[in-house]
Image: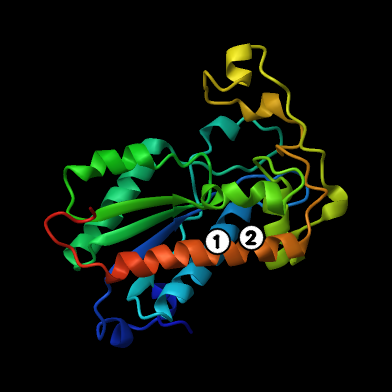
Amino acid sequence: MNDFILAEQTHHFIRQHKWDAAVLPFGATEPHNLHMPYGTDTFQVDEIARRACAHAYTRGAKVLLLPTLPFGVNTNQLQIPAAVTLSVTPTTLLKILADLVDSLERQGVRKLLLLNGHGGNELKPLMRELHHRSNVFLFLCDWYKICADQYPKMFEKPSEHADEVETSLALAFFPQFVKMTQAGKGEVKPCRFEAVRKKWISLTRPWHLITTDTGIGDPTPATPEKGQALMALLTTRIGDFLHDLATTPIDKSFPF
């Protein structure tokens, strides 16, 4: 039992403390190449959240970890053959977030970190939607971006989806669900438009047309050691922020 994990605690314990900040992890349920579990995004973000909150809590921060949402926006993956992708729409995700933010505000929690583990969950627009109608301060962390500056040093072929990075985390923290002998190459069919290839123009990618195994990036260089090293860095960077967030008083100019 961990003091800071809401789902594991009793009301007797929770009501004795004033929680200065909360963390809401966002996952997804989707295929990850042929070798990783459908719960990869959820497993990863949940583990990162637990460790980061523990890092902050042991330093004295009253930070509360909320249950991880296992469903994300996967509308562009629903045509993948023979898959069981579970998707909500951005509108539904906004409603869920709005209701949870309202619940926290009513109970006195006014700082919330949205810890995102799935690229399809574009949460910034949802934060803008809530900005003018909530007194809760929202912060966003896409975990796969926070240590990207170190990827060239830590990985051989970092990419995007079920790649060396995600596979390394999986091998380190939920290896029982990983079947490396089944891994596809993670090759991607390039868009015919040069502007899209150069990322001048973006689009919602039809996943069933760009990859045959649902992966984007070669997973074969992955190792548990790389996953452990990445997790250590994620824990420190996110955990330090959570400590600062929870221990900084709200005044008229917060958060600046």
| Frontmost residue, 82 versus 233 | 233
Circle 2/circle 1 CB separation < 8 Å: yes
Element at label 2: helix
Say few, some or many: other residues with alpha carbon within 10 Å of mark 1 (under 14 / 14 to 19 / 20 or more). Answer: many
Element at label 1: helix
As drawn, is 185 to the left or to the right of 249?
Answer: right
Q: Looking at the image, which residue sits at the far right? A: 181
Residue at 64% across, 60% down: 230
Residue 66 visible at all: no
Expressed as whole percent of the image width and height from the top left, the position of residue 20 reads 27, 71
Judge whether 198 appears above or below 67 on screen.
above
Numbered circle sitting on residue 230: 2
Expressed as whole percent of the image width and height from the top left, the position of residue 10 reads 36, 83
Say few, some or many: other residues with alpha carbon within 10 Å of mark 2 (under 14 / 14 to 19 / 20 or more). Answer: many
| Frontmost residue, 46 versus 137 | 137
Expressed as whole percent of the image width and height from the top left, the position of residue 140 reads 39, 50
Residue 155 visible at all: yes
Expressed as whole percent of the image width and height from the top left, the position of residue 135 reads 17, 54
Q: Amino acid at mark 1?
A: Leu
Judge whether 239 appears above or below 155 on screen.
below
Numbered circle sitting on residue 234: 1
Q: Amino acid at mark 2?
A: Leu
